[in-house]
Amino acid sequence: MFALNLLTLAFAATATVALPAAKRDLAPSCNLLGGGAFDTATNFTLAAWNTTLPNANNTGVPLVLGQAGAISGAEFKVFSTFASFPFNQYPSLSLDKGRLIPHGTDVAPAKAGTVPDGSEPGFIVSNDSDPEQGAQIYCGVADIDPAGHGTGHPFLAVNGDTDSFALCKAGTQNNIVFKPAAGKGYDLSSCYAVKVQIIEEF
Ligand SMILES: *[C@@H]1O[C@H](CO)[C@@H](O)[C@H](O)[C@H]1NC(C)=O
Ligand SMILES: *[C@@H]1O[C@H](CO)[C@@H](O)[C@H](O)[C@H]1NC(C)=O
Ligand SMILES: *[C@@H]1O[C@H](CO)[C@@H](O)[C@H](O)[C@H]1NC(C)=O
Ligand SMILES: *[C@@H]1O[C@H](CO)[C@@H](O)[C@H](O)[C@H]1NC(C)=O
């Protein structure tokens, strides 16, 4: 995280001071997300950081890929709190040019789907899935405020937005939803706003 911040800062400084006209060559999913935006990272996990109540720590609640049903030959996964879905088959994630890719041992590949308003960011898992063909809609946003107002962790954005995630109860699971809406299969009244944080593993 420290290295990432330094790199981002160095890059931002170069871009504004030395090369004012140069455009950073980032995936379109990072458009308008500012100098801290990055479209590629390896080996991280995600955590949900409550934006309304104090958190136990600056990390927030760990997220894992939770089940979300299956069809013949394929399963669906969404982000659930580990507390509500205590299995972790895909213990690390990477971000490749705006594509979010889960990694695990002895598991089928997981390909990210698009995330319409009201839906749960998710993946289709099957032996035919190609994660490199997943929806190119994610971006990381590091905190580059010199005053250091952030949590120390970058936020995840989907569809160019870091500010519209919530945790909502769906059955026994507590799942990440983007722009919660009525009639979508989770309990809307249970939703509360979170930011999704990128926690770098070393
Ligand atoms: C987050 O805040 C909401 C209220 O806004 C609360 O209901 C919920 O329990 C909190 N969750 C955690 C994990 O702190
Ligand atoms: C942060 O607090 C959450 C509970 O809200 C806990 O599940 C998690 O393990 C804690 N993370 C760290 C790094 O202490
Ligand atoms: C993928 O293939 C393996 C080995 O053939 C099989 O055991 C597994 O059930 C398949 N996974 C899915 C999601 O179809
Ligand atoms: C990711 O982090 C884990 C935990 O520290 C480490 O064991 C693993 O080697 C790392 N993987 C990669 C690809 O860097």
Image (cartoon, rainbow, N blue to C red):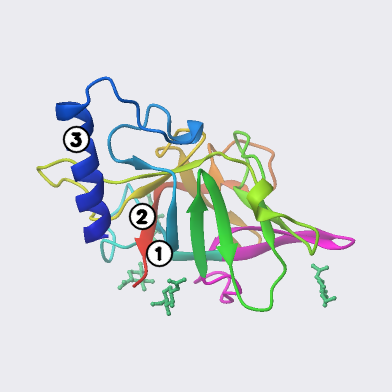
Q: Is residue 44 above or below residue 196?
A: below
Q: First in sequence: mark 2 or mark 1?
A: 2
Residue identified by numbered label 1: 61
Q: Is residue 152 above or below residue 66?
A: above
Secondary structure under the numbered disc 2 in the rendered image: strand
Real-space Cα separation, disc 2 to disc 3, in angstroms: 31 Å
Outermost residue on the right side: it is: 72
Residues shaded magenta: 65-91
> Which residue sits at x=65%, y=47%?
134
Q: Which amino acid does label 1 sit on?
A: Val
Crowdedness near tag 3: few (<14), some (14–19) or many (≥20) residues, C-alpha within 10 Å: few
Asked if disc 1 is less than 8 Å from ligand 2, the answer is: yes
Q: Which mark is residue 84?
A: none
Mark 2 touches mark 1? (CB < 8 Å): yes
Amino acid carrying label 2: it is Trp
- 3 left or right, relative to 123: left
Q: Name the residue located 52 percent from the left edge and 72 percent from the top edge.
A: 91
The C terminus, quarter of image: bottom left
Q: Would you say the beta carbon of the disc 3 residue lies within 8 angstroms of ligand 4? A: no
Amino acid tagged 3: Thr
User: Which residue in the structure is indicated by mark 2?
Assistant: 49
Q: Earlier in the sequence, mark 2 or mark 3?
A: 3
Sequence order check: which comes first, mark 3 or mark 1?
3
Q: Mark 3 points at which residue?
A: 14
